[in-house]
Every structure is written in structure tokens, then in C-alpha cells.
Image: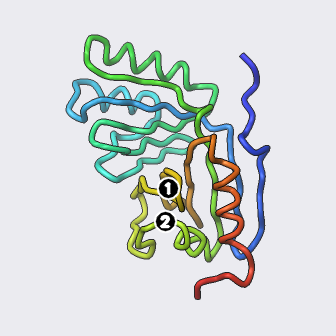
Amino acid sequence: MSDPVSTLGAASYDGFATIREIGPLGMVTLRARADLAGLTEAVRAVTGTDLPLPRRIEVAGACAAGWMSPDEYLLILPHDRTEAAVTSISIALQGQHHLAVVVSDARAVFRIEGDKADQVLAKLVPVDLPALPPGEIRRTRAAQVAAAFWRQGDGFTLVCFRSVAPYVMGLLTHSAMPGSELF
């Protein structure tokens, strides 16, 4: 297996907020009904988090589990642990209807940080950011592309498809240009 690389070579931009492409980050898409026997334990075993409730993300150190839809979860963990995570989940849920797939190489991840990080996203997403509570994940659109994001620390983490990473970096960079603050 080759060494993983970040989508944009760890690109960054310092404007009125800091934009950083982070990665490589391990990600597993897990499709299963929330009431599936052993699901909570399987997620806890690979991420150290509880199974997230609707529109929530649970974070434990470098790992997280985010609710993406009624039967879909995004598991985030160190890149080198994804294959073992899928194996662990498959064993734990054996014989039950589920799907666990490594999607790390199909995704790009960005951090938007600083006191005005919310202003960068406010220009791009149809979300009332001041009302977004900590621990809530939003699956929406950033301009014209699918994205998911959540508040974390002094900013936000945003996940999108790798194929649109240059476009998203351009959107974030343009939105963070000095002089374009909203207030």
C-alpha cells in the first residue's frame, strides 16, 4: 500500500480566518439501522465514542462518529486504522444487514479557524450558524457541492468529496479574504 497523501498537499490560507486542508484522515462510511444489535458497541470499539443521535457528532480525541442520515454514520479515525475498523465492524455485525466501507481517499477535509470562522461558512452554507450548537453536524451544500461540517474548537471542520477539493478550497479562501467580513 502506498503512503496516503492529502488532497491539496496541506494547502492553507490566512485571511480574516485561517483555512487549512487537513489529512490524510481515515474515514469509514457505515450504513446500518440505529437499532441494529451490536451497532453501538461496534462503533464504540473503533472510535471510542457513543453512537451519535440524529444530527450529532461524537468526538473522542482523534476519533469521531457523525450521524449522516437515519441509516448512515461517518466514522473518523487515524488513516492507518481504517481497514482494521471495517474488519472489526464486519465481525461485530456479522449476519446482520450493514455496510462498512473505507472512504478516506474519496474525501477531503478542511479546518476553518479563528474568531470569524463562522463568517467564512455563512457566505457558503444555508445554515443559521449562530444557532448551531456544539456537537451538531450538518450535511448540506457549500455553494454548489455536497459537504458536511461541525463546530470544533475555535472553528469548524468541513468534509467534502475529494474531486471538488480545489473548488472548495477556492470558495473558502475567497470567503476568508480580508475586507470581506460580514460584520
Residue density around tag 2, few if under 14, some if 14–19, many if 20 or more, within 10 Å:
some
Could you say whether the residue bearing mark 1 is in a helix, strand or loop? strand
Could you tell me which residue is drawn at 42 percent across and 24 percent down? 100
In the rendered view, would you say 38 is above or below 26? above
Residue type at mark 1: give it. Answer: Phe
List x then y, in percent, for residue 103. 54, 31
Name the residue carrying label 1.
149
Say if mark 2 contacts mark 1, CB within 8 Å.
yes
Between 133 and 146, which is closer to the camera in this rendering?
Answer: 146
Q: Is residue 183 left or right of residue 13?
A: left
Could you tell me which residue is drawn at 68 percent across and 82 percent down? 180
Q: Look at the image and tell me in which quarter the N terminus lies.
A: top right
Furthest residue toward bottom: 183
Circle nearer the N terminus (2, 1): 2
How far is disc 2 from disc 1 in space, using C-alphas?
10 Å
In the rendered view, would you say 95 is above or below 172? above
List x then y, in percent, for residue 32. 30, 29
Name the residue carrying label 2.
125
